[in-house]
């Protein structure tokens, strides 16, 4: 069953990439559709004049329909969806909460750094450094962060880049001996912004984010 689920996820990922490619080159595909339509029309005229080219006329007409229809089909699977490289800053920030933290992202974590890449376009990535330069607060003090068996907490910067250009920065706090990385709630509330929550999910290597959010008395805003 797990292998089947993995196959389905991989297939959806490939389908997603194909749909994005079609949407990016929709104009070119329509031009090809027009060319094949003209060729099909010419073949049809020859067929009407007595030439035995019915299969050729049929194939040319079919190819024309395929080229014309492909942008609409792609739009059905990913409506109103731009490639990452064509998105504005705000569009990227709106896009990230709609990704799947497990199937859409991958990356590596080491003792000194962590990086997560978007599978669709690896130029979009989060990067954190666990050395001195990446520490936001050496001794993070908030009730929600210090209420665990290990009361020490430390804040780290998690930076978002696209193609090497810096886009955004958030804080994730290592709590309970770095058992979980929690996003701080909004000031004077216990509510975590959905964007920050999704970033924390992307980096949830222990798969216990929701458990620690509950333990900390926090909640996630409605998406």
Image: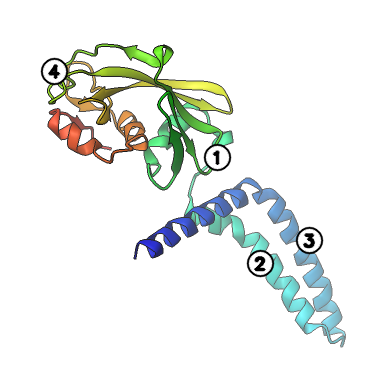
Q: Nearer the viewer, mark 3 or mark 4?
A: 4
Give the vertical position of 194 relative to 12 (above or below). above
* Relative depth, front residue between 54 and 211: 211
Secondary structure type for disc 2:
helix
As measured in the structure, the alpha-carbon distance from the residue carrying label 2 to the one carrying label 3 is 11 Å
Cβ atoms at labels 2 and 1 below 8 Å apart: no
Q: Name the residue tied to disc 3.
A: 35
As measured in the structure, the alpha-carbon distance from the residue carrying label 2 to the one carrying label 4 is 62 Å
Q: Position of residue 76 (x, y in %)?
A: 49, 56
As measured in the structure, the alpha-carbon distance from the residue carrying label 3 to the one carrying label 4 is 67 Å
Sequence-wise first label, 4 or 1: 1
109 sits to left or right of 20 = left
Dot 2 surroundings within 10 Å: few (below 14), some, or many (20 or more)?
A: some
49 sits to left or right of 17 = right
Q: Position of residue 82 (x, y in %)?
A: 54, 41
Q: Residue at x 43, y 12 (%)?
A: 133
Q: Position of residue 54 (x, y in %)?
A: 78, 83
Circle number at residue 65 = 2
Sequence-wise first label, 2 or 1: 2
Q: Name the residue tied to disc 4.
A: 143
């Amino acid at each position: 069953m797990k292998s089947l689920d993995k196959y389905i996820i991989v297939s959806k990922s490939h389908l997603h990439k194909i749909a994005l490619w079609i949407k990016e080159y929709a104009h070119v595909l329509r031009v090809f559709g027009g060319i094949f339509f003209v060729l099909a029309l010419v073949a049809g005229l020859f067929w009407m004049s007595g030439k035995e080219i019915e299969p050729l006329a049929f194939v040319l007409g079919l190819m024309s329909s395929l080229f014309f229809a492909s942008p609409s089909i792609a739009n059905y699977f990913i409506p109103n969806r731009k490639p990452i490289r064509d998105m504005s800053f705000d569009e990227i920030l709106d896009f990230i909460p709609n990704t799947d933290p497990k199937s859409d992202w991958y990356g590596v974590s080491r003792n000194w750094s962590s990086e997560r890449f978007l599978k669709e376009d690896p130029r979009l990535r989060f990067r954190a450094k666990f050395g001195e330069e990446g520490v936001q607060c050496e001794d993070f003090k908030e009730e929600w962060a210090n209420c665990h068996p290990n009361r020490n907490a430390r804040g780290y910067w998690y930076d978002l880049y696209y193609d090497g250009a810096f886009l955004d920065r958030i804080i994730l706090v290592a709590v309970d001996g770095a058992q979980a990385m929690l996003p701080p709630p909004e000031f004077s509330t216990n509510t975590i912004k959905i964007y920050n929550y999704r970033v924390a999910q992307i980096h949830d290597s222990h798969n216990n984010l929701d458990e620690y959010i509950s333990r900390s008395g926090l909640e996630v805003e409605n998406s």
